[in-house]
Amino acid sequence: ARLKSKESLEVFPSFPSRVPADGTFSLVGKCNSSQRSLDLSICYGSGSQVIATSEHTIPSYEVGSKKISMLERYLTIVRMKEMMLEDNYKRYKDTFVQLGKKYGLPSEFASFVVLNKLSLFLKHDIMPPKSMPEFRKSYMEITSKRLMEEEQKKINKQMILLGIYNRIIN
């Protein structure tokens, strides 16, 4: 795919792709353009030989709309799939982790745990999200209590050691 203007365009798949027998084809992209629409040329052919070209005008979406965030997430999925096709895709480990965290996408390098019980949050020492206020409050109360108990145990051990030390000296 080619953009007619000089604005930058990111398109996936970025390499020649085979069109399935049913004729469907998906092209995903992100334009860093301030224009209200985007004029795009899609080239069809075999190898590096272009047999046909089709012209398309694609309207842009307002930034911040739900459609944009879903499109960005889908673009990220396609981008990650394309990176996985490369021989040394492991060089993108940091990128996979960053994209996984930002868009909630698991990969070989980033996974997610679904926790639905307070005991699981406590067991794995993971603070519940703000969207679970009751779990979050209970988690904070329990972990605060645990920290205070651990601190008290340390103080008790220090007092015992101090008592032993005083007996040895006297």
Image (cartoon, rainbow, N blue to C red):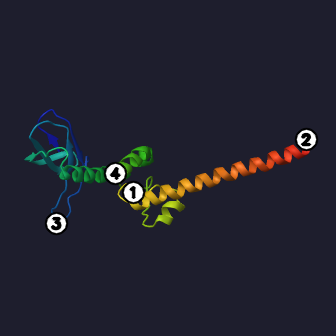
Which of the two labelled residues, at mark 4 and mark 2, occupies the earlier sequence position? 4
Q: Which mark is residue 22?
A: 3
Which of the two labelled residues, at mark 3 and mark 4, occupies the earlier sequence position? 3
Q: Which mark is residue 106?
A: 1
Q: Nearer the viewer, mark 4 or mark 2?
A: 2
Mark 1 residue element: loop
Determine whether, in the image, residue 148 is placed left or right of residue 39: right
Which of the two labelled residues, at mark 2 and mark 3, occupies the earlier sequence position? 3
Determine whether, in the image, residue 155 is placed left or right of residue 112: right
Determine whether, in the image, residue 53 is placed left or right of residue 97: left
The type of residue carrying mark 3 is Asp
Whole-Å distance between the Cαs marked 2 and 3? 90 Å
Determine whether label 1 and label 3 are within 8 Å by CB: no
The type of residue carrying mark 4 is Met
Q: Residue at x 40, y 61 (%)?
A: 134
Residue topped by disc 4: 80
